Image: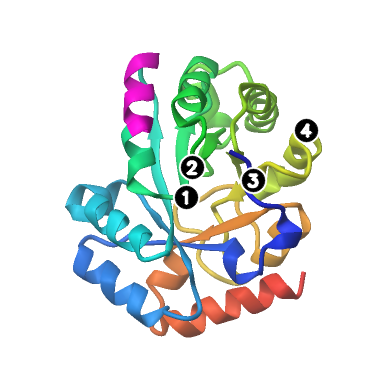
Amino acid sequence: MRTKSMQAQSIQERLIVGLDVPTVQEAEKAVRELDGVVSFYKIGYQLAFAGGLDFARELASGGTKIFLDMKLLDIDHTVAKGVENIVKMGVSMLTIHAYPKAMRAAVEAARGSELCLLAVSVLTSMDEQDMIDVGYEYDPHTLVLRRSEQALHAGMGGIVCSAAEAEAVRRIVGPDMAVVTPGIRPAGSDHGDQKRVVTPAQAIRSGASHLVVARPIVAAADRREAAEAIIAEMRSA
């Protein structure tokens, strides 16, 4: 499934807050604090393995959009069966590692549903030396573009990539696919373990449909204020 066009989305809908916290109780607190400002949340490994999957179902059943960041990769049958059950959870987005066979299996399993499947291209924590270390023959930028083409041909709903590659990816996938960019850091903030980062405004200008922001919001002293500041920066793009 393709995401609705960027023109049809409000800026608030394009901000996804990563609930990268250790407990459901902490996640619930963050959601309460961000109520009315944020309507889309990412749940990844940390929270998923602490009761976060049930929390994802609960939020989704109440109309909150959930990006389930599971980065699935396995044999085709296993990926397909996983996707079939994730469809039943009612979440909005799901990540699959951008291997062509895995993507095709996921697309077939999600056919007819509202689930937007996102292809994970190259993690934003990886640079060229990291690619060499794991045996890839491509630099990060080249591999992102190659995997974007493969995701388009597989019928995926979008791409996850660094905003540094978003403009080039958008040229490949066209206007309708989601381009979801993690590694977003407001100007002057700590990059943490991210290596290919940009500011919220830069990401929007580069063609990103959605921005994933975790630590700059969930680790802020005032989460609501931090989210509002990022939304304001997105609007200024």
What secondary structure prevails in the magenta region?
Answer: helix
Q: Which residue is mark 1?
A: 92
Q: Which residue is mark 2?
A: 115
Mark nearer the N terminus (1 vs 2): 1
- Residue 231 to residue 109: above or below: below
Q: Which residues are magenta?
A: 76-84
Q: Which residue is mark 4?
A: 172
Q: CA distance from mark 3 to mark 4?
A: 12 Å
Which of the pair 194/31 is nearer the observer?
Answer: 31
Mark nearer the N terminus (1 vs 4): 1
Contact between labelled residues 2 and 4, with CB atoms less than 8 Å apart:
no
Contact between labelled residues 4 and 3, with CB atoms less than 8 Å apart:
no
Q: CA distance from mark 1 to mark 2?
A: 5 Å
Q: Residue 82 lies in magenta, yes or no?
A: yes
Instruction: Look at the image and tell me whether residue 75 can be seen.
Output: no
How many residues crowd mark 4 within 10 Å: few (<14), some (14–19), many (20+)?
some
- Residue 123 to residue 64: above or below: above
Amino acid type, callout 3: Ala
**Residue at left 60%, top 38%?**
157
Quadrant housing the N terminus: top right
Disc 4 element: helix
Amino acid type, callout 2: Leu
Mark nearer the N terminus (4 vs 2): 2
Of labels 3 and 1, the one closer to you: 1
In the rendering, which numbered label is found on residue 178? 3
